[in-house]
Amino acid sequence: MKPRIRLLVLGLSCCLLASGCTAFRSEWKSAAKIPVPTDDIAGRWKGTWRSDVNGHHGGLRCIVTKLDASSYRFYYDASYKRILHGYYTITQTVARADHTFKLRGSAELPKIFGGHYDYEGTATATNLTSNYTAKADHGVFQMMRP
């Protein structure tokens, strides 16, 4: 790739990351004003992600929004080495059994980030654990209420 094109791609990537950062920060601050439910998983979550394939790991924040009786929107901010952030949203099917929530969903991320991912996990009102799998990676998300 020519130096000018690389610089252009890098600049556009930075702009996209900055816009994702601004949108997530705004939603994160707004969600902080809403009381944390004691019988649902909606709201803010904070924790870590870890790859079981290569050991990469980082911080993870998520805003969960209930869409209807069986689906929730998960808006993630995943960091790596504290400076690289990825922002993405997925819808997961959630089935409740007493005080436990079973989560299942998938996401299509850019190929550079692994492509298709499947997620499966469990949550209570205070703890959320989810395993992820992709063609070349698999690992775990572990989060609690901030």
Image (spheres, rainbow, N blue to C red):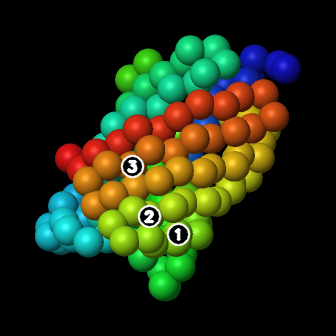
Q: Position of residue 51 (x, y in %)?
A: 58, 24
Direction from residue 138 to residue 62 in the image, left or right:
left
- Kind of residue at disc 1: Val
Label annotation for residue 94: 1
Total numbered circles:
3
Query: Which of the pair 29/133 is nearer the observer?
Result: 133
- Kind of residue at disc 2: Phe
Direction from residue 130 to residue 63 in the image, left or right:
left
Residue found 53% across the figure and 34% down from its top? 140
Residue found 67% across the figure and 25% down from its top? 7
Quarter of the N terminus within the rendering: top right
Residue 18 is at least partly visible in this image: no
Check the image and report above or below for 5 versus 2: below
SS category of the residue bearing label 3: strand
Looking at marks 3 and 1 on the same chain, the residue that comes earlier in the sequence is marked by 1
Please say if the residues under marks 2 and 1 sit with CB atoms less than 8 Å apart.
yes
- Kind of residue at disc 3: Leu
Residue found 51% across the figure and 45% down from its top? 130
Q: CA distance from mark 2 to mark 1?
A: 6 Å
Residue 34 is at least partly visible in this image: yes
Query: Which of the pair 80/44 is nearer the observer?
Result: 44
SS category of the residue bearing label 1: strand
Q: Which residue is mark 2?
A: 101
Q: How crowded is the residue under tag 2: few (<14 C-alpha within 10 Å), some, or many (20+)?
A: some
Q: Which residue is mark 3?
A: 128
Q: How crowded is the residue under tag 1: few (<14 C-alpha within 10 Å), some, or many (20+)?
A: many
- Front position among marks 3 and 2: 2
